[in-house]
Amino acid sequence: MAKAEYNKTHNGSDNNSPQTEELQVGFIGNPNSGKTTLFNAYTGAKLKVANWPGVTVEKKEGVFKSHNHSYKLVDLPGIYSLTSYSIEEKVSRQYILSDDVDVIIDVVDASNLERNLYLTLQLIEIGKPVVLALNMMDIVEERGMEIDLHRMPEMLGIPVIPVSARKKTGLDILMHAVSHHTEIEPENDPIVVYSDLIEDKITKITERLREHNPDIYNPRFYAIKLLEKDPEIMDTCPVDVSDILDKSYETEIIKQKYDFIEEVIEEVLINRQERARRTDKIDRVLTHRIWGMPIFFGIMGLVFLLTFALGDGIKGIFEGWLESLSIWVDSSLSAINAGPILISLIVDGIIAGVGTVLTFLPNIAILFLALAFLEDSGYMARVTYVMNGIMNKIGLSGRAFIPMLLGFGCTVPAIMATRTLENERDRRKTILITPFMSCSAKIPIYVLLSGMFFGKLASLAALSMYIIGLVAGLLTSYAATKVENKIDQLKAPGEKPEVNQLLIELPEYKNPNLYSILIYVWENVKEYLAKAGTTIFVASIILWFILRFSTTGYVEDMSQGFGAAIGRFLVPILEPAGLGFWQISLSLIAGLAAKEVVVSSMGILFGIINIDEAGISTIYQSLEAIGFGPLNAYAMMIFVLFYTPCIATLGVIAKELKSAKWTTFVITFQLAFAWLASVIVYQIFKLILY
Ligand code: GDP
Ligand code: MG
């Protein structure tokens, strides 16, 4: 933020004829409060999507015309507070403080007032015109709750308009209120009055800011931010207030805002008890100090049991279909006299590659179904809370656990979810370790290898990957934090390391919405199918080609092809990890396209079409023949667990880190870690077992 912020005078006041001028209206609110739905209700499909300057946060703009008013609407990212920790918060705050915005529409989920009002209070404190859109009124009515619409604006000092974005009610009144609320008195009494100690400091800082700059617009906001030791405001503060600022009052200020919210809720919300009571009751068990964690691990255990046990059952059906398909294609192609190379490309290349990956669809769908269920019921938010203790010990906030958990589904959205993290370091560390959480694309590899080599212990072997990955991730973050603190100590001796504070409001539990769960699962399944149709399809063809061709043309014996030559080149490096086989190293390289390709390439390499019982025993025999046993299989699972994620993930990592240096570091680190871990596992077990 530039110094100029302090010199700003309110721009609404020179708006003499708002009738003719275009009003710029920013939509702000908590995630899921219905901003986008409301925004779309006004703008329809006519919107412009771009990014906020310099960051990957989406910016949506649209125009709405009513009577002789024209409004330029801007949809801001969903945020819970106006600190400068996350990129979303920075973007939103910068926009609100800028001259661009005339009126802010604070979109509040009326069915979750308590949580939503925290942001509202901060917006009011900024001192720009705010209109509160009390959204989801349909839900409020359905639940038999009532909100005192007379008392609420009185207590908050801003217009409160009940709407339902989904049912499109109250929209005209809301915009009407906006057009009449473009100016406010800067000298209004504050809405939240803090304790005497804090108010006293606010007064002192305010006076000093005014002395330095008599034109300053809303010094109270800056004073409060200074008392919270907001890093951005501190950096740009033009006057020295260090004598008043003996410490950070952030926690006190947060608490006192919540005290005020409690008062508001007490007065304006009628009939809220029942649901809240149910949530409290459930939370007493699920977020219990001692039981919370075992319950969480129990739930995750159940999720994985379903994913593997139930998923494998359904997988059998898929395999049957695939088998029939490949037999049918083979015979039809022969019947029309297709050449053997073409038949090989289609059957050994495409069907073997894409098909093997598709048979894992049931496992993946079940995993996403379970994750969606946890999210929609409200339990996911509790996970943050339950895991906060452990996460703090490894130098991360409880919030970082959500990206990690999502990482079990797919690393791409998981990396994107790190945007909600408070600071750069947290983000970087989380991005570094999230790929260690076994994503669903690794499932086929674990299922295949452990099924072949570990018999009754197969599930245990697969499960161990999840645990090893999680532990390695936690340890890595712990070590990284230690290094960071060391560096800080060297740079600024004597300063205490920053402590992460977690402030989350737990939403009420609700019955999961089947529709939104199914949408979520379908979107992820679609993504998986699309990957099978594109990346894996192409990778399978390329792989088939390099395996089946050499400088002399088509080769029957794959060990004579280009692929074998590439694989052999890496054999010496992978030898100490028990992976010194050209077939294995080749499939590992192929896995960079997408992790499923490791399995599809083994299908192609060992000439099998279907990973059914017969197919597996063919692979098993081929592996046995080259001297690849259980220990090698386990080392390979370890390597796959840790090594560089797929191209798609690397793309997102590069985009999120916005730094070639850090991206290179992440890739190198993961490759080195994978190699070292599999070497250690292989060598130690070799000593013990043989
Ligand atoms: P955003 O994250 O703030 O942009 O929220 P969205 O606009 O994506 O809305 C989140 C969810 O709430 C979606 O499933 C919407 O359909 C739903 N939603 C939004 N407004 C309303 C409303 O007024 N009533 C009801 N029942 N649902 C709503
Ligand atoms: Mg949205």
Image (tube, rainbow, N blue to C red):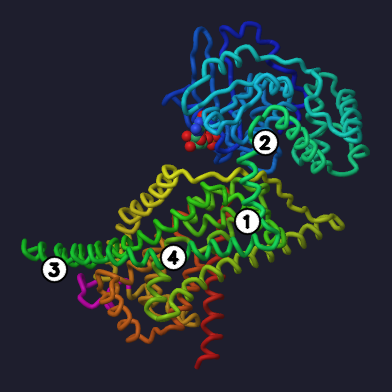
Q: Are marks 3 and 2 in contact (CB under 8 Å)?
A: no
Of label 1 and label 2, which has the lower sequence position?
2
Q: Dot 3: within a 10 Å radius of its alpha carbon, few (fewer than 14), some, or many (20 or more) residues? A: few
Look at mark 1 in the image and give the residue it sits on.
Answer: 286
Look at mark 2 in the image and give the residue it sits on.
Answer: 114
Q: Disc 2 beta carbon < 8 A from ligand 1?
A: no
Separation of disc 3 and disc 2 at Cα? 69 Å
Relative horizontal placement of residue 324, taking residue 444 as reference (left or right) = left
The quarter of the picture where the N terminus appears is: top right
Q: Give the residue displayed 68% in from the left and 61% down from the top.
A: 390
Closer to the camera, 659 or 19? 19
Look at mark 4 in the image and give the residue it sits on.
Answer: 442
For discs 3 and 2, the disc positioned in front in the rendered view: 2
Give the residues drawn in magenta, as a range.
551-563
Could you say whether the residue bearing mark 4 is in a helix, strand or loop?
A: helix
Relative horizontal placement of residue 268, taking residue 105 as reference (left or right) = right
Residue 51 shows in the view:
no
Q: What type is the residue that disc 2 sits on?
A: Glu
For discs 2 and 4, the disc positioned in front in the rendered view: 2
Q: Disc 4 beta carbon < 8 A from ligand 1?
A: no
Relative horizontal placement of residue 579, taking residue 609 as reference (left or right) = right
Residue 224 shows in the view:
yes
Residue 340: give its label: 3
Of label 3 and label 2, which has the lower sequence position?
2
